[in-house]
Image (spheres, helix red, strand yellow):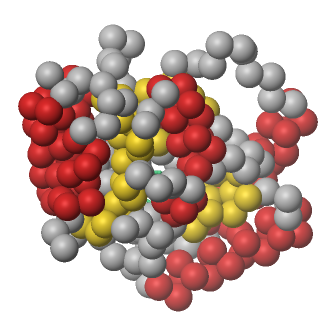
Amino acid sequence: MSAWEPISALARVPRLLVALDFDGTLAPLVDEPMAARMSQDARAAVEALAQAPGTTVALVSGRTLSDLRVIAEYDDDSPLLLAGSHGAEQWPPPGEAPAPVDPLLLTRRDDLRARAEAIAADADRAWVEPKEFGFALHTRLVSDAAVARGVQEKIAALMAAEASDWRRRDGHDILEYAFRAEGKDGAVARLRAQTGANAVLFAGDDVTDEDALRSLQPGDVGVRVGPGETAATVRVTGIPELAALLTRLARERDTLRE
Ligand SMILES: O=P(O)(O)OC[C@H]1O[C@H](O[C@H]2O[C@H](CO)[C@@H](O)[C@H](O)[C@H]2O)[C@H](O)[C@@H](O)[C@@H]1O
């Protein structure tokens, strides 16, 4: 079966939500996270889908929302919806103002992040990304796998001792801890309700995307970008193949839903 076959039915649904992970799905992985940008083909596909009849595109990312806005080169006129921090943040903001974060949680976040930074400083080129609800240890640039594992284990031990209630997430050369446990499944459920979608296409490349992929319903389509165990029913080799499928979907929706 070709990758297009399960997706073709989505060309006809009256209201379609296309929810897309960012890093590794639309944007190639790079050493400096704030330098990540959608590939030219992926950006063109996203823009075409966002203009297609009855179609909403959402970016559903682990990035802090303010960072996602920068790397997605998002402006307030954009028709795209955004979910950041794995779904704990959204744009446009929800109708009701979210409850302010308990300042004690922010103090604890800053303290634990500082301690993680001190641990990371011992491993050449390991570093800690500050995140809205926690922090992430990056080991992409650590050339020795044993050193990378060692620093991950030390930070895991710190968090097991000091913050065992925080959610741990493992990804591509990244180990993240957050005091908010929301996952991409919740973001997709909220976006589905908000857009009144009859069906959802979700695409992602990493472990955190599996929350959303597992939550899909009959009639939806999940796409895994690249290798790895997955709940998705469709797999593509990488960003170029996904961009080609999204472009075809936009074209078919333009034709069938005019
Ligand atoms: O949910 P996503 O949109 O896929 O975001 C997941 C994490 O992406 C970023 O890290 C990953 O991409 C970096 C840039 O290509 C790369 O250097 C890193 O190795 C990857 O793990 C981001 O820095 C994290 O905050 C996101 O959670």
200 on left or right of 115: left
Quadrant location of the N terminus? bottom left
**Residue drawn at 54 percent across, 62 percent down:** 214
Q: Position of residue 88 (x, y in %)?
A: 65, 38
Residue 108 seen by the camera:
yes
Q: Up-down: is 236 above or below 45?
A: below
Q: Position of residue 2 (x, y in %)?
A: 16, 69
Q: Residue 147 appears in which quarter of the rendering?
A: bottom right
131 on left or right of 146: right
17 or 145: nearer the viewer = 17
**Residue drawn at 33 percent across, 11 percent down:** 77
222 or 40: nearer the viewer = 222
Q: Up-down: is 55 above or below 119?
A: above
The quadrant of the picture showing ligand 1 is bottom left
**Residue drawn at 34 percent across, 60 percent down:** 223
176 or 47: nearer the viewer = 47
Quadrant location of the C terminus? top left
Q: Up-down: is 146 above or below 155?
A: below
Q: Up-down: is 195 above or below 28?
A: above
122 or 201: nearer the viewer = 201
Number of disc labels:
0
Residue 48 seen by the camera:
no
Q: Position of residue 109 (x, y in %)?
A: 77, 45
Query: Looking at the image, which residue sits at the far bottom?
Result: 146
Q: Position of residue 15 (x, y in %)?
A: 36, 30
145 on left or right of 57: right
**Residue drawn at 22 percent across, 69 percent down:** 237
